[in-house]
Image (tube, rainbow, N blue to C red):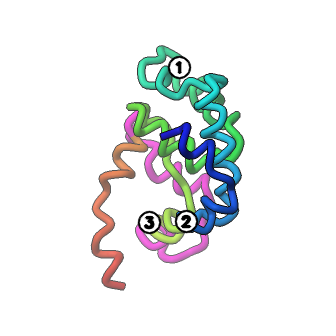
Amino acid sequence: MAEQLAATGATALCSAAGLGYRAPYVVELARAVDSGELDLESLKTTDMPTAELRKHLLAIKGVGGYAAANLLMILGHYDFVPVDSWALKTVSREWYGGEVVGQAEVEASFEGWGEWKGLVYWFWDWSYRDEE
């Protein structure tokens, strides 16, 4: 799969998959994986502490805090909450009466769950929010 993506140009990938500005990052990542420069498979079994693993993920061009938090959860590390605009809006309604909140408030809302806060966020029942 990485080989196929690496061989695809960003323009073709953008139009075929609708990735927009992300297409060059995906192609660059695929090329790094295909060449062996980056071994993503090794992240599945690494014994790196979560903070170090997060730094490693953030060093990948195109990976920001939101993507890193999601990737960490996929890898079994739940120490970080993936904060995006939806999380800001939803947490604002849930705990702050609709006041504008930032990343700190979202993270504080789940701090009580410690190393499991990302998992708690992931499985929180937000379904009633779709009705508003």
Identify the mark at residue 16; answer none if there is no mark: 2
Badge 1 or badge 2: first in the primary sequence: 2
Q: Relative to residue 117, is residue 10 depicted above or below? A: below
Kindly identify the residue that appears in the image at 60 percent across and 59 percent down: 13
Q: Which residue is mark 1?
A: 49
The residue nearer to you, when weighing 5 against 28, is 5
- Residue 64 seen in the figure: no
Location of the C terminus by quadrant is: bottom left
Boundaries of the magenta span:
92-116
Mark 3, Cα crowd under 10 Å, few <14 / some 14-19 / many 20+, is few
Please give the residue where the numbered disc 3 appears in the rendered image.
95
Looking at the rendered image, the disc whose residue lies closer to the viewer, 1 or 3, is: 1
Q: Residue at x 53, y 38 (%)?
A: 2
Horizontal and vertical percent position of residue 63: 64, 45
For badge 2, the amino acid type reads Ala
Cα gap from disc 2 to disc 3, whole angstroms: 40 Å
Q: What is the C-alpha distance between the residues marked 1 and 3?
A: 31 Å
Residue 62 spot, x, y in % from top left: 68, 47
